[in-house]
Amino acid sequence: MATEAFLPLTTPMKTFLSWMLWPLLVITCLLITAYGMAAGSPVLYFNFAYLFLIISLFTLEKFMPFEKEWEQPDGQTFANIAHTISSKGTVQLLLLWGGVIGLTEYMKPLADSTPYGIWPRDWPLALQVIMGVYIAEFGLYWAHRLSHITPFFWRFHAIHHSVTKLWFVNTGRFHFMDSLWKIMLSLTPLLLLGAPMEVIQWISAVTAFIGLLTHCNVDMKCGPLNYIFSTPELHRWHHSRDLSEGNRNYGENVILWDQVFGTFINPSYRPPTDIGMSDYLPTKFLHQLAWPFLTVKARQRLAPDYVYKPFVYEEK
Ligand SMILES: [Zn+2]
Ligand SMILES: [Zn+2]
């Protein structure tokens, strides 16, 4: 193949890379972000790091894919990108609207002024960020787990699970309601505790980098890191059609809450290639956006082949 001739990777090189890639990419992105924070341009440098990660994963998915079958197009690229933009845009709009009604001004003292809250601002920044990641993750874990348990939240979250292949492009494939629900549960405790904005920026950056990695179709071996972080190896189980595997590994950044609440799995055998869900979902973006709000009758009008199926939850 032309790509392999351009960059020949021998098996030992691929093995070495597969073990090194996850920590190497995360550390590089964190260093770029840290430089940006120190230089006073956190957003610009975060975007550099994010772009670097996108280009790296795009290239690596070509040279060392985890699953060859997932290289085939699934017709969902536009929908994936449109959901990413609409969910990220909704969160931005909410923050803007918060500013308009004065909510942001109200929140500012919570986040920026020294006297508010019980947040340990005198701790080293790295320690504050680590603690913040675990606190935010508690909200993310329960928002995600409840999205699998309750029919109402599953309506929205199902869009994320409708993909039949994993690659970095479907990382942001979330219904905007799903994103709002998650951000609410993860951000509120941090703001109430009085976490500084710098810590919140760091947590957002870490979540963006680790999230992009969890969906990538790159052959990465994470070994002991699978017991600390949400890695691609762990997240592939979460996309299994088999609900006893799929209703597991809810973690987004770290996997502690899965270990605490008994939903962690890390089997030694290979996860299934045939991923997805048994629920029906239309293929067009706008139909997918409307789908969770529709009644059975409205769904049948939109998609005549739609057959109603009762919600099923299975964990063991
Ligand atoms: Zn899920
Ligand atoms: Zn996912």
Image (tube, rainbow, N blue to C red):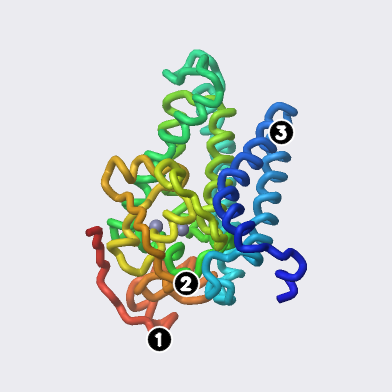
Q: Secondary structure at mark 1?
A: loop
Res 200 seen here? yes
Mark 1 neighbour density, 10 Å: few (under 14) some (14–19) many (20 or more): few
* Percent x, y of residue 69: 53, 75
Q: What residue is drawn where x is 68% and y is 63%?
A: 9
- Where is mark 3, residue-wise? 36
**Which of 32 and 77 lies nearest the eye of the viewer?**
32
Q: Say if 198 sits above or below 17 in the image.
A: above
**Cα gap from disc 3 to disc 1, whole angstroms:** 52 Å
User: Nearer the viewer's eye, disc 3 or disc 1?
Assistant: 3
Mark 2 neighbour density, 10 Å: few (under 14) some (14–19) many (20 or more): some
Q: Secondary structure at mark 3?
A: helix
Precedes in sequence: disc 1 or disc 2: 2
Precedes in sequence: disc 3 or disc 1: 3
- Where is mark 2, residue-wise? 164
- Where is mark 1, residue-wise? 304
Q: Say if 251 sits above or below 198 in the image.
A: below
* Percent x, y of residue 171: 54, 57
Relative side of 84 to 191, left or right: right
Q: Hey, what amino acid is under mark 3?
A: Gly
